[in-house]
Image: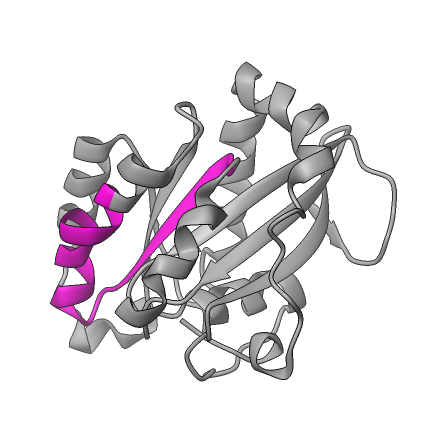
Amino acid sequence: MDLSSGTQEFDYLFKLLMIGDSGVGKSSLLLSFTTDAFEDLSPTIGVDFKVKYVTMGSKKLKLAIWDTAGQERFRTLTSSYYRGAQGIIMVYDVTRRDTFTNLSDIWSKEIDLYSTNQDCIKMLVGNKVDKEGDRVVTKKEGIDFARQYGCLFTECSAKTRVNVQQCFEELVLKILDTPSLIADGSKGVRNNIFKDRPPQSDASTSSCC
């Protein structure tokens, strides 16, 4: 997958949404993917938004990636961001059990409630595997959860960049393999994906989790 930035032509526009508890590293994963850098960022206020152009095979893609706040006080703001998403990335911290249990207690229920696309591809991501000595959630638990909820699954580290690009690449490949999502990306979403775009502010440009 070739990555590039800047305005350019594209064949498909896909909307990806990142969800999960505060502090699991969503924004750090996004930053690692879009800029090849790592920062230990402060919590996201509301929602952050980044665009990444990628080429997969002969297809030129524009990825609009929405990074939502994990704190409960912002959760009512995020429901509209599920609209039209072709991919949803659920992130948990392998060193914090509560961030894993909240996937079934909170986040999977939000997807059922707010997602408008029944064919939306879900990706489960266990982050912070660089802290293997502090791990409390096993890889098998992640695999079992993903199997139960019909998700793709990977473990990665935003800090060391292990599996970060593969996470997004696998998700996008699955979207490209789903005809209804291809149709969305080639027409309707082009016109309305930015309709609910959050206002740009200093708070939304340097944020995390």
What is the magenta range? 85-109
Query: Farthest residue in the top direction?
Result: 179
Residue at (27% x, 68% y) in the render: 72
Residue 37 location (% of width, % of height): 60, 75
Residue at (17% x, 57% y) in the render: 102
* Residue 182, quarter of picture: top right
Q: Is residue 94 magenta?
A: yes
Residue 118 location (% of width, % of height): 39, 24
Residue 1 can be seen in this image: no
Residue at (28% x, 45% y) in the render: 110
Q: In this view, does 179 lie above or below 9?
A: above
Residue at (16% x, 47% y) in the render: 104
* Residue 95, quarter of picture: bottom left
45 to the left or right of 206: left
Residue 67 can be seen in this image: yes
Q: Is residue 23 above or below residue 21?
A: below
Query: Farthest residue in the right direction?
Result: 8
Q: In this view, does 169 lie above or below 65?
A: above
